[in-house]
Image: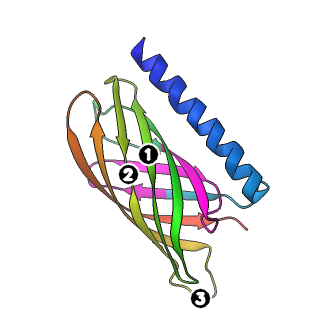
């Protein structure tokens, strides 16, 4: 029962955030990403990373046996937006279905766009201090690629 409540909470916050982002970007470009954090990978889809506020959904892409599948909703604010990099900070909530875990965190990261003629391709470096609500504190580091469709 608790996992249903948590999942509903994530969905409600995601919908509210998407409504806000849609008002800003007029359903503008979206980005897709592939991230890796040591043991687990993630695939993501989100709104335009060049906006002041943007969000994304991340899905666990695990190749480990007995690893719980998870969905995370992230809400970011770009604190610094430059031509070749962005610095963002945000809020993350996640649910993991097979282990009945729930996680919250504060992602801090850089999106680096090193190719002058192709700014849609970017590299993500992110650290997320987070806590599994019923168990322990964790610090996750993500490295990955993002591509913005324009």
Left or right? Give the position of 60 relative to 117: left
In percent of width and height, residue 70 lies at: 41, 35
Q: 138 above or below 108? A: above
Residue 60 seen in render? no
* Residue 57 belongs to magenta span: yes
Tell me where the magenta segment starts and ends, as one range. 34-58
Residue at the bottom extreme of this rendering = 116
Disc 3 secondary structure class: loop
Q: Of callouts 2 and 1, which one flags the residue occurring earlier in the amino acid sequence?
A: 1
Label 1 packing within 10 angstroms: few (<14), some (14-19), many (20+): many
Label 2 packing within 10 angstroms: few (<14), some (14-19), many (20+): some
Mark 3 and mark 1: Cα distance apart in space: 31 Å
Q: Of callouts 2 and 3, which one flags the residue occurring earlier in the amino acid sequence?
A: 2
In percent of width and height, residue 137 lies at: 21, 42
Left or right? Give the position of 49 relative to 20: left
**Residue at 73% of width from left, 68% of height from top?**
150
Label 3 packing within 10 angstroms: few (<14), some (14-19), many (20+): few
Q: Which mark is residue 92?
A: 1
Q: Nearer the viewer, mark 2 or mark 3?
A: 2
The residue that label 3 is drawn on is 116
Residue 7 seen in render? yes
The residue that label 2 is drawn on is 106
Q: Of callouts 3 and 1, which one flags the residue occurring earlier in the amino acid sequence?
A: 1
């Amino acid at each position: 029962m608790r996992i249903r409540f948590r999942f509903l909470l994530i969905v409600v916050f995601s919908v509210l955030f998407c409504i806000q982002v849609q008002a800003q970007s007029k359903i503008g470009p979206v980005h897709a990403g592939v991230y890796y954090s040591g043991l687990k990978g993630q695939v993501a889809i989100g709104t335009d990373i060049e906006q002041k506020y943007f969000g994304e959904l991340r899905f666990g892409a695990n190749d480990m046996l007995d690893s719980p599948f998870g969905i995370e909703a992230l809400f970011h604010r770009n604190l610094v937006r430059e031509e070749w990099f962005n610095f963002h900070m945000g809020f993350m909530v996640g649910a993991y279905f097979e282990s009945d875990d729930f996680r919250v965190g504060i992602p801090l990261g850089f999106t680096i766009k090193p190719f002058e003629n192709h700014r849609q391709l970017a590299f993500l470096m992110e650290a997320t201090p987070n806590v599994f609500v019923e168990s322990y504190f964790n610090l996750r580091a993500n490295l990955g690629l993002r591509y913005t469709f324009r």
